[in-house]
C-alpha cells in the first residue's frame, strides 16, 4: 500500500512478556519515528531514525524499550518484560527527511498494546 | 524543552457553528507548527502546517490556523463545521533543529447534526 503499515493492529499480552511491534514506512522515506499514545493523552516521542545516522533514542522511557531499523526500511520496536503502564497505542510515522521540518510526517494506524 | 497545551479537551457544536480550537506552545526558538486530525477509526492525518511566511495558514476541508508569535499560539478555526468534522484534533510543534514532534493532548470535537 501507499501508507505507513503497522503490525499487529492489536496485541494483548501478559505482564512480563516481551513484545515486538513492526513498522513498514512509505517507500523512499528516510526518516522514521515511533510515538506512544496513552489513553487520554497526546503522543509521546520515543525514537527517531534518519538514514544511516545513529538513532535519537532520547524519548525511550526505560531500557526495556529498544528499536532497530534494518536496511533503512522496516523498523521493529521491542518492549521487554512488559508492565501494565506500557499499555498504549504505539504509532509509527515516516517522512521524506528531517531537514528543517519541511517534510510532514505520515502516520500508520498504530498498534494497540494491552498488558494484562 | 518544548511543550504544547490544548485547553479544550472536548468540544460539542451544532452543524454550521463556528469553530476555534486553542493551541499554545512553549519553546524559545523558531518553530514549525502543525495541526493533525484523527477521524474515527482512521490514522492521524495532516490538516495544515506553518513553517514561515504568512502567519495565516489555510489547510484542507476549509480549516485555517493563525500563528501569533507574541502569544505563542496557533489556533485552529473553521467558519462553519459539518457533522463530518467530528474527530480528534492534535496540535504539534517542532523546534527547528529538532526532529520529533511534540503533541498536545488533543481536542475531541463532536458535531451534532
Image: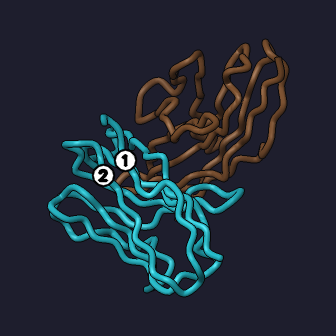
State the residue position of label 2.
Answer: A24
Judging by colour alone, the chain drawn in cyan in this rendered image is A
x, y percent for residue A92: 41, 54
SS label for mark 2: strand
Disc 1 and disc 2 in contact, CB within 8 angstroms: yes
Residue at the spot of label 1? A5
Label 2: chain letter: A
Chain in brown colour: B
Is residue B28 visible in the rendered structure shown here?
A: no
Measured in 3D between alpha carbons, the distance from the residue under mark 1 to the one under mark 2, in whole angstroms, is: 5 Å
Mark 2: few/some/many CA within 10 Å (<14, 14-19, 20+): many
Quarter of the figure with the C terminus of chain A: bottom right
| For residue B17, above or below residue A113 | above
Residue under mark 1: which chain is it in?
A
- Of marks 1 and 2, which one's residue comes earlier in the chain? 1
Q: How many marks?
A: 2
Could you tell me which residue is drawn at 39 percent across and 66 percent down? A47
Residue B21, image x, y percentages: 71, 34
Amino acid at each position: 500500500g501507499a501508507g505507513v503499515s503497522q503490525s499487529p493492529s492489536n496485541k494483548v499480552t501478559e505482564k512480563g512478556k516481551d513484545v515486538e511491534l513492526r513498522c513498514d514506512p512509505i517507500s523512499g522515506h528516510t526518516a522514521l519515528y515511533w510515538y506512544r499514545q496513552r489513553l487520554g493523552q497526546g503522543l509521546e516521542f520515543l525514537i527517531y531514525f534518519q538514514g544511516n545516522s545513529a538513532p535519537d533514542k532520547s524519548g525511550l522511557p526505560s531500557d526495556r524499550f529498544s528499536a532497530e531499523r534494518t536496511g533503512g526500511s522496516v523498523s521493529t520496536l521491542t518492549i521487554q518484560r512488559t508492565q501494565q503502564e506500557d499499555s498504549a497505542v504505539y504509532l509509527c510515522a515516516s517522512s521524506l527527511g528531517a531537514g528543517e521540518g519541511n517534510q510532514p510526517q505520515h502516520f500508520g494506524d498504530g498498534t494497540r498494546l494491552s498488558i494484562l | 524543552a518544548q511543550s504544547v497545551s490544548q485547553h479544550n479537551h472536548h468540544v460539542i457544536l451544532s452543524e454550521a457553528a463556528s469553530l476555534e480550537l486553542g493551541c499554545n506552545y512553549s519553546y524559545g526558538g523558531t518553530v514549525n507548527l502543525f495541526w493533525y486530525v484523527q477521524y474515527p477509526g482512521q490514522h492521524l492525518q495532516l490538516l495544515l502546517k506553518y513553517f514561515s511566511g504568512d502567519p495565516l495558514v489555510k489547510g484542507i476541508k476549509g480549516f485555517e490556523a493563525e500563528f501569533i508569535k507574541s502569544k505563542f499560539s496557533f489556533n485552529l478555526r473553521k467558519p462553519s463545521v459539518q457533522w463530518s468534522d467530528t474527530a480528534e484534533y492534535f496540535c504539534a510543534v517542532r523546534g527547528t533543529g529538532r526532529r520529533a514532534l511534540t503533541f498536545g493532548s488533543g481536542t475531541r470535537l463532536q458535531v451534532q447534526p
